[in-house]
Image: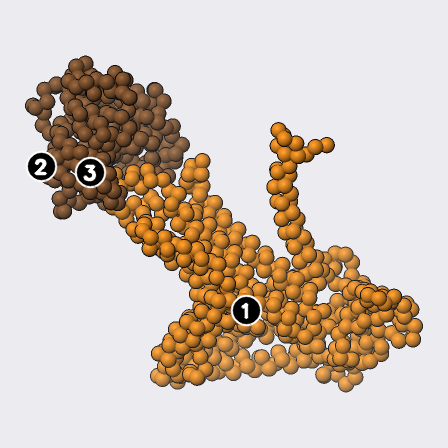
Chain colours: A brown, B orange
Amino acid sequence: MTDFTSEASCFEVEGLSLAYDGKPALRDLTLRIPRQRVTAFIGPSGCGKSTLLRVLNRLHDLNEDVSRQGRVVLAGQDIHAPDVDVAELRRRVGMVFQTPNPFPMSIYDNVAFGVRLQGIKRKRVLDEIVEWSLESAALWDEVKDRLHSSAWTLSGGQQQRLVIARTLAVQPEVLLLDEPASALDPISTLKIEELIRSLKSRLTLVLVTHNMQQAARVSDYTAFLQDGELIEYAATDNLFTNPRLRRTENYITGRMS
Amino acid sequence: MRLWSRGSEGGWPWLAAGSVALSLLALLALLVLLGSRGLVHFWPAPVEVVTLDSGERFAGQRMRQERVAGDPQTDVLYRTGNRDLDGNYWRWVDADVIDTRQRPDNMLVLEREHWGEFLGRLVAIRQSDAATPLPLSGDEAWQVLSARLERVEALRDQHRQLSDEVIEPVARRLVALRSAGKADPAQQAALIERWETAHQRLAELDAALSRDTLILESVEGRRLEQPLAGVLAAWQPNAMTWMDKLFHWARGVGAFLSEGPRAGNLEGGVWPAIFGTVMMVLLMSLIVTPFGVLAAIYLNEVAHQGPLIRLVRIAVRNLAGVPSIVYGVFGLGVFVYGIGGQLDSWFFSDSLPSPTFGTGGLLWASLTLALLTLPVVIVATEEGLARIPVQQREGALALGATRYEMLRRVVLPMAVPAMLTGVILAVARAAGEVAPLMLVGVARLAPQLPLDGEFPFLHLDNKFMHLGYHVYNIGFQGGDVERALPLVYATALLLVVVIVVLNLTAISLRHHLRARHRALDR
């Protein structure tokens, strides 16, 4: 598992640079994200790890004045190619944000939201998908009796799992997680981490986190970014126990200035 | 005691609370003034028979007394009615020259279709089929009058019903048949027969209505013949119990709300004005909401947020400050003369030179007010859209929603309460506007409602009445200020009530919708 080169790749990032308003945010990144593994991006605030994540499903398109060089390839296709359907790309590459963001609708409607966008309207099918998704997100038992009450009545941790269920409902190939547990209490965090590990068998997960222990606990590979550059990228065990570079070691041991 | 000491809260909470209290007090004073002056008008005032030192006698309802500055004497104002007898409706009397004042039980007040009120006694009733009049006095006179008045009212109802439900529809169908050209003679004959029988019946009713004539006598002793058909109501205020008066008052308020105006708007009710106001505001809301919401969506969601959009936004906010009469002038120039004139020359050239849409009307007034309130709706909606967290938008996009789907399914439903806030503000502003309406379609008297059973049901080209303009009109354009003043207060109160009801409707709708996303307001 620690053997990098034998993994099938999901994303291939080649020479990616990104600048907002002329200010560089990512500098010439090249990395492969392996399929059905958990890859963590760590690094100090403003290092570009969230930006990199948002490039992977093209959410950065929403920002104006962005210039980009380089390619991002998903399953053999450049995601920035002109013929790519952005909505379809985002369905394939789901994303979970730092603060839970359920829509102001019922739990059921939240999970069915993305499915309905695909044009699926039949109640039997929707019921099945909703149950399956909530079970996959380990939330079914807690909410099965109140599927039609507002999603806002759930606790923060439950809301975050609901958001994951909502994303899983559209059958994505990749799940991007942008500090998914940073707004949650320790027990909820634990549940999210368990969930991440259990989902690995089905899809590729990319995790951005500030929490080094969390990266160490759940990820298979870890990339360390600083000032928009990829400093070190290795199997998680190697990176944490035996970093090659002094800068990486300083960061993971907390000697970062 | 030191209110303004350092370290304690100081006086500023008192200052803040004081200004709230002052505002509430002003509002309360407004309502109390309008309510007391307006609603007292419908209370049956007692009729006094006044004897002066000179021996002269007259009857009247005591309204108020006034002391002229620098003059030792007090003047009393009496409402004497009987304008057809002496040409006056009011009488000022010097309080010092009043000898006695009595309130005899049998003083009668008649509300009449013409000439206003009559104050006096009933001395006889003449029937057209009887040779001599039937002399009456005392209680008997009142009982006979009540019975006859009831009969007249029943006949009037039949008359109205017949003309509304038979004569008018039949006449309309006859006209339609004739203009269609291929009239079926049998059908036409049947219709004409129905029309003729109905007309015959109507003539019978008219005859029955004009059977009785009242012979009345004023306190001064002058006699007057009054056809009973022209009497709308009769009462003896001095003989009424408290309950009777309350009932009379409620009936008066009811008639004010449900009837059309009479006698130069100084009598009768304001129903067409209530209807016109509500109709215009509803139409205005229907026009302004989609426009305002779409404009706000463009400004906030679609357009590139550059200097041009900032300029547009400033311009929109400034539009809210343009005086309303300017919108009236714009509406007159563009809607009435421009678009209306063009519509007339295209579609209604048969009826030219009398204009159809080329003159003020309900549609143009609603459009003008919609323009006036557009900035309010845009600003409120934009603020609502801007308040929706970016996470909600990104959440929708990350699930594979297009930008349109994100707007349609997540952003707009969440912004609905804000849009309704905009509509509420727009309604509040539009319902109170009078100045622009005077240019684009409000009428002094338009008893025909803009909504009826005749195709196309909603007559957008009709002129309409408006409570605000009604206040202005009866207060400043009528001749008899004393008679108009209570109606001014009553109509103003009604305008306030109508605006409150319209607003409460919109607020309850917003509350209902907000309950669905209650958590947003956490």
Residue A68 location in percent, x, y?
18, 41
**What kind of residue is marked 2?**
Gly
| Residue for point 66% across, 65% down | B487
Q: CA distance from mark 2 to mark 1?
A: 72 Å
Residue A145 location in percent, x, y?
36, 30
Instruction: Locate residue A24 relative to residue B160 in the image: left or right.
Output: left
In this view, A172 is above or below B121: above
Q: Which of disc 2 and disc 3 is earlier in sequence?
A: 3
Q: Is residue B462 visible?
A: no
Q: CA distance from mark 3 to mark 1?
A: 65 Å
Q: Return the residue at label 3.
A: A18
Read off the chain for label 2. Answer: A
Query: In the picture, which quadrant includes the C terminus of chain B?
Result: top left
Residue B465 — which label?
Answer: 1
Read off the chain for label 3. Answer: A
Instruction: Locate residue B454 relative to residue B135 in the image: left or right.
Output: left
Please tell me which residue lies in front, A59 or B131. Answer: A59
In this view, B517 is above or below B504: above
Mark 3 and mark 1 on one chain: no
| Residue for point 37% across, 55% down | B311
Q: Return the residue at label 2.
A: A76
| Residue for point 36% across, 47% down | B412
**What kind of residue is marked 1?**
Met
